[in-house]
């Protein structure tokens, strides 16, 4: 199967719920798929599926604007990547942690100058200061995003 396909389900209350599905890389010669349902229309499911497929296909690619600040990159990440499939409260919590912890410490640096080791040192410092597991887990997400 190539691309995104849609499907419908009839819920217990009689309403129809739409979803999308696409293939990912096989693991152990077994077919792997990503699917998500709960959309109100076929068009909405297809649009979300295309966005998810694009995100899957481009994960790990390097952002080229070398003079972009880390602060601007985080804003771009929240607006373009997080808004795709995260709840508004999750995005609000991410923005709070970014504004209160990351931007004051690392936000002014150019994106090209920040290394994984810098982010890891930042996380270790937060761990040593007794921050919660939830906050530290979010900071670990940034290591993979950058």
Image: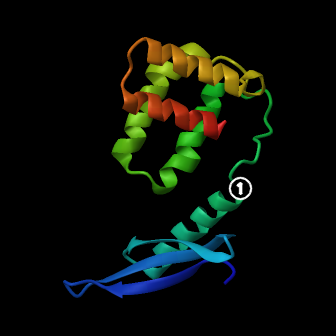
Quarter of the image where the N terminus is located: bottom right
In the rendered view, would you say 13 is above or below 102? below
Furthest residue in direction front, as rendered: 28
Q: Position of residue 91 (x, y in %)?
A: 42, 42
Q: Residue 77 vs residue 91: left or right?
A: right
- Residue 108 position within the rendered picture, expressed as x and y whole percent measured from the top left: 65, 17
Give the residue at x 75% y 48%.
Answer: 61
- Mark yes or no: residue 69 visible: no
Find residue 39 and report its image quarter. Answer: bottom left
- The C terminus - image quarter: top right
The foreground one among 1 and 25 is 25
Most foreground residue, 20 or 137 = 137
**In this figure, which residue is indicated by the disc labeled 1?**
58
* Quarter assignment of residue 9: bottom left
Residue at figure coordinates x 41%, y 86% from the top left = 8
| Residue 17 visible from this viewpoint | yes
Corner quadrant of residue 130: top left
**Residue at 60% across, 73% down:** 32
Residue 109 image position (x, y, % from top left): 69, 18
Tell me the SS state at disc 1.
Answer: helix
Q: Is residue 79 above or below residue 12?
A: above
Q: How is this picture coloured?
A: rainbow
Residue reaching furthest to the left: 13
User: Would you say 99 lies left or right of 93 here?
Assistant: right
């Amino acid at each position: 199967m190539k691309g995104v396909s849609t499907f419908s389900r009839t819920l217990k209350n009689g309403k129809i719920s739409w979803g999308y599905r696409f293939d990912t890389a096989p693991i152990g010669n077994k077919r792997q798929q990503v699917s998500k349902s709960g959309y109100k229309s076929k068009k909405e499911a297809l649009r979300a599926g295309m966005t998810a497929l694009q995100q899957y296909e481009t994960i790990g690619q390097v952002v080229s604007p070398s003079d972009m600040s880390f602060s601007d990159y985080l804003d771009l990440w929240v607006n373009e990547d997080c808004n795709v499939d995260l709840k508004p409260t999750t995005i609000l919590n991410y923005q709070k942690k970014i504004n209160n912890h990351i931007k004051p410490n690392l936000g002014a640096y150019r994106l090209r100058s920040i290394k994984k080791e810098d982010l890891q040192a930042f996380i270790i410092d937060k761990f040593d200061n007794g921050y919660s597991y939830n906050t530290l887990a979010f900071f670990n997400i940034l290591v993979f995003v950058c």
